[in-house]
């Protein structure tokens, strides 16, 4: 272990010093998984912040009935772009691209991913797709106004620039498939000696399950989006009832990808939580095999539940019976994870530092998201809350309270390792409190509004919904102030904060055994793994 | 009202209570256990972990089996409630709801059409859903019913209003710029009053007839009568106003007159007022007299 005072300043040492190329080309043409990870990280973070601004604008518009700051057409475009950017440019590529790339090869004791150039190519595809989507906002008939779901026949008729936006999402999809292939191959072929499947860190297990979903489900999204473009330009009539088509077929095709995509978003987040909790409780994870298995079970069963987005659509009652049943089946592996995480805390030695606070918030917020999901899975109750603010609240509990809080936890847990410096603890805790409180005010209120019957994607609403909408908007301001404080504190710390040694948290996975920041080659010599990922005694951690 | 008849609200609400109740117990249990462990085993109090346990097969079995039973109960209860929403009582009164961007109109068996859904209290109503253009959603929160209105597809929803009153009816499936304005009401009135209403023809008085036509064709979803900004320009004071319009991409300034109003109803996208989207559907099915009545009414909105 290097003494703390010998750690080089941030942006220096380890892989940061890997020269040969200079300036920006050392990044955008690098095949080092750590540099690609940071490229992805800053790209997805930028899109996240853009979409946050759009989300805040939506909340300001909804602060009072009638027009507040924008007209209905603008509002419709803003919620569409908020959804498209958050889903396709932030959270789907987010975990795999950034922390998957940064951490996974080191956690399995590899030098890099199996196909480093393909890895760089996937980032370029992502940027190309993002550029097309951004172009679609400022050209043609203006930004798309269809909602992120692009439902037909509306998406075929609207004069806005849907075709170009859809083409951008199509390209981003290929980036996702390529990353999935790369990760599956890497995890199969590049594990170090002694890194058996039973010693794989749970974050790697979750990435593995996610990668399979990316490979198997994303092509269907590609086909679906290509069909929209064909409808718009060639008038094929596949989804148009006037020409013998069926709008419901589009919904099936869309959700066959987009429901599993929710698991692409949340599974790596669950993996992060499974890393943070044992490290800060200093105890082996409870039920390792069950957590690893439940990731695979969620990926498999989650691919068969897409129809629960269509209970009101006119789909047959038999289909509703089957999809409702399967939806409840997929609740079980999620519950297993929650129970195992909580049990890991029992008789541990719990340190409440920032990553752990985010993990604990995840457990609570994800539980609320999951439990409200039961209302949506049951056929009778779904009918009332489908397409209302309840769904908006539920979805944000799962994806923001779940996946994004896990992403924030990962930022506090892993980024210091790659910068060699850390953030200040106190402001991080304050930011966490603000976000946790603001989050619940914003989104719990939405669920209440939905129960009262306020539909989603509404620019204007009846006076009876006004008080709660105002509360939700105020909550969003608290949430955003916490977010700003968190980011300022985190990045100040990464560039100017206190230096850290190789294992600041006392964790037992492989990434904490190499120098901080990690060298380009990761390991000086190929590691031989002799203990499990959460065997603190075996790793010699007191 | 038939005492054996279960309303849709009565079929759905117990399922809400059951799932919310079980969820609340689980959530409180998880939260209390987590907080309890964090306090009891915080590092200042427990400097060393006192267990290295990494699992317990019996615990795993317990927390797989118990939640499985709970969720299967929820599934079954939810399904049986849903069946009540699908089994339409035999004596239900049929009404056809026609949805278009962005208005509702309801047609009764005798051909009467109304922008509001009038129903008799205590009598089940089955609404057959027809869309003229894109997807819409027929949603009455008070009765817990919702069904998408899909072009080319025969969907329905049924409900029974057990008390007189006015209930909100929303469009629940996003359908474009006027989506949130596509709302109307269900007017539940006593059976006798309903029968009288159904028999009565459309209003005779000219002024009311003009307004009724605008309501019937959904004009007021996008054009207000009181100056409120909506999807389209307000009718208040529109006659005689000087406006800038786009005609085939070129701007010109005109004065709103009878001829302009007439053209805007029959060929709405010929001249679009600057600042508004060219999204209004045309109404070729209107008779000459109907158009005249509407134009005369609009002239009078001050």
Image (tube, coloured by chain):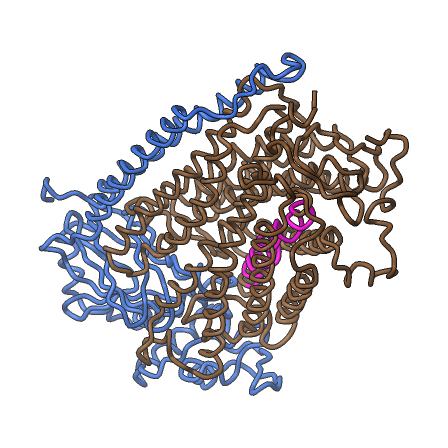
The answer to whether residue A263 is magenta is no
Q: Colour of chain B?
A: blue
Chain A: its colour in the image is brown
Counting from the top left corner in percent of width and height, residue A165 is at 57, 69
Q: Quarter of the image for the N terminus of chain B: give it.
A: top left
Q: Is residue B18 visible?
A: no
For the residue pair A402 and A122, the one nearer the viewer reads as A122
For image coordinates 77% across by 63% down, the residue present is A29
- Rendered location of residue A183, percent (x, y): 59, 54
Image coords of residue A201 (percent x, y): 59, 38
Residue B247 vs residue B43, the one in the foreground: B43
**Residue B114's image quarter?**
bottom left
The part of the chain drawn in magenta is: A77-104
A460 horizontally vs A326: left or right: right
The answer to whether B235 is drawn above or below residue B187 in the figure is: below
Point 68% across, 43% down: residue:
A109
> Would residue A440 appear left or right of B196 to someone viewing this image?
right
Residue drawn at (36%, 70%), measured in percent from left and top? B214
**In the depicted structure, whether residue A344 falls above or below residue A127:** above
Q: Main secondary structure of the magenta part?
A: helix
């Amino acid at each position: 272990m290097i003494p703390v005072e010998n750690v080089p300043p941030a942006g220096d040492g380890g892989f940061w010093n890997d020269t040969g190329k200079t300036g920006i080309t050392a990044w955008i043409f690098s095949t080092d998984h750590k540099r690609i990870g940071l490229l992805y990280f800053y790209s997805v973070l930028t899109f996240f912040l853009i979409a946050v601004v759009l989300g805040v604008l939506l909340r300001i518009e909804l602060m009072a009935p009638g027009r507040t700051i924008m007209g209905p057409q603008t509002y419709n475009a803003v919620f569409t772009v908020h959804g498209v950017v958050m889903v396709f440019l932030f959270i789907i590529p987010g975990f795999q691209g950034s922390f998957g790339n940064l951490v996974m090869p080191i956690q399995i004791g590899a030098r890099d991913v199996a196909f480093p150039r393909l890895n760089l190519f996937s980032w370029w595809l992502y940027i190309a797709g993002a550029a097309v989507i951004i172009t679609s906002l400022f050209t043609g008939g203006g930004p798309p106004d269809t909602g992120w779901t692009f439902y037909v026949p509306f998406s075929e008729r609207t004069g806005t620039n849907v075709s170009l936006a859809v083409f951008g999402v199509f390209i981003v999809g290929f980036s996702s498939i390529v990353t999935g292939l790369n990760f599956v191959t890497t995890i199969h072929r590049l594990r170090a000696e002694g890194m058996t499947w039973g010693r794989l860190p749970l974050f790697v297990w979750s990435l593995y399950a996610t990668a399979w979903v990316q490979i198997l489900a994303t092509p269907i999204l590609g086909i679906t989006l290509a069909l929209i473009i064909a409808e718009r330009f060639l008038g094929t009539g596949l989804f148009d009832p006037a020409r013998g088509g069926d709008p419901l077929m589009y919904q099936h095709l869309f959700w066959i990808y987009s429901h599993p995509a929710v698991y692409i978003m949340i599974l790596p987040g669950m993996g992060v939580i499974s890393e943070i909790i044992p490290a800060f409780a200093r105890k082996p994870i409870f039920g390792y095999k069950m957590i690893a298995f439940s990731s695979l079970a969620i990926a498999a069963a989650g691919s068969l539940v897409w129809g629960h987005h269509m209970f009101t659509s006119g789909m047959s009652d038999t289909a509703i019976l089957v999809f409702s049943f399967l939806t409840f089946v997929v609740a079980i592996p999620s519950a297993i994870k929650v129970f195992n995480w909580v049990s890991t805390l029992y008789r541990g030695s719990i340190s409440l530092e920032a990553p752990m606070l985010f993990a604990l918030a995840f457990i609570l917020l994800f539980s609320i998201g999951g439990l409200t999901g039961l209302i949506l899975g049951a056929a009778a109750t779904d009918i009332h809350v489908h397409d209302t603010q309840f769904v908006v609240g539920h979805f944000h509990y799962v994806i923001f309270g779940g996946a994004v809080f896990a992403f924030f936890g990962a930022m506090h847990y892993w980024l210091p390792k790659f910068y060699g410096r850390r953030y200040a603890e106190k402001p991080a805790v304050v930011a966490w409190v603000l976000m946790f409180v603001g989050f619940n005010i914003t989104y719990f209120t939405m669920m209440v509004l939905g129960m009262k019957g306020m539909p989603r994607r509404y620019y204007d609403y009846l006076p009876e919904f006004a008080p709660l909408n105002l509360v939700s908007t105020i909550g969003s301001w608290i949430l955003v102030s916490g977010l700003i404080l968190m980011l300022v504190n985190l990045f100040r710390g990464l560039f100017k904060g206190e230096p850290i040694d190789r294992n600041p948290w006392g964790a037992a996975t492989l990434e904490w055994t190499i120098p901080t920041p990690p060298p380009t080659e990761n390991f000086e010599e190929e590691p031989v793994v002799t203990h499990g990922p959460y065997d603190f005694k075996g790793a010699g951690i007191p | 009202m038939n005492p054996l008849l279960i309303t849709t609200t009565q079929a759905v609400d117990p399922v809400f209570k059951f799932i919310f109740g079980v969820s609340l117990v689980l959530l409180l249990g998880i939260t209390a256990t987590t907080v309890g462990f964090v306090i009891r085993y915080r590092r200042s109090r427990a400097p060393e972990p006192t267990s290295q346990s990494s699992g317990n097969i019996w615990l795993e079995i317990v927390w797989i089996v118990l939640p499985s039973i709970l969720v299967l109960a929820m599934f079954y209860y939810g399904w049986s409630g849903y069946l009540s929403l699908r089994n339409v009582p035999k004596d239900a009164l049929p009404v056809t709801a026609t949805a278009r961007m962005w208005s509702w109109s309801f047609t009764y068996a005798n051909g009467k059409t109304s922008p509001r859904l009038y129903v008799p209290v205590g009598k089940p109503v089955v609404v057959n859903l027809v869309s003229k253009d894109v997807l819409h959603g027929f949603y009455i929160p008070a009765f817990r019913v919702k069904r998408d209105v899909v072009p080319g597809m025969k969907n329905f929803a049924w409900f029974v209003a057990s008390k007189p009153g006015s209930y909100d009816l929303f469009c629940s499936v996003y359908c474009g710029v006027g989506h949130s304005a596509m709302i109307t009401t269900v007017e539940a009135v006593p059976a006798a009053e309903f029968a009288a209403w159904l028999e009565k023809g459309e209003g005779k008085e000219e002024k009311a007839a003009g307004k009724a036509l605008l309501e019937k064709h959904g004009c007021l979803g996008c054009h207000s009568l009181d100056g409120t900004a909506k999807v389209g320009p307000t009718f208040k004071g529109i006659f005689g106003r000087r406006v800038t319009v786009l005609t085939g991409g070129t701007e010109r300034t005109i004065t709103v007159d009878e001829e302009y109003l007439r053209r805007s109803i029959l060929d709405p996208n010929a001249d679009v007022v600057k600042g508004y989207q060219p999204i209004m559907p045309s109404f070729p099915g209107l008779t000459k007299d109907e158009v005249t009545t509407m134009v005369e009414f609009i002239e009078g909105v001050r």
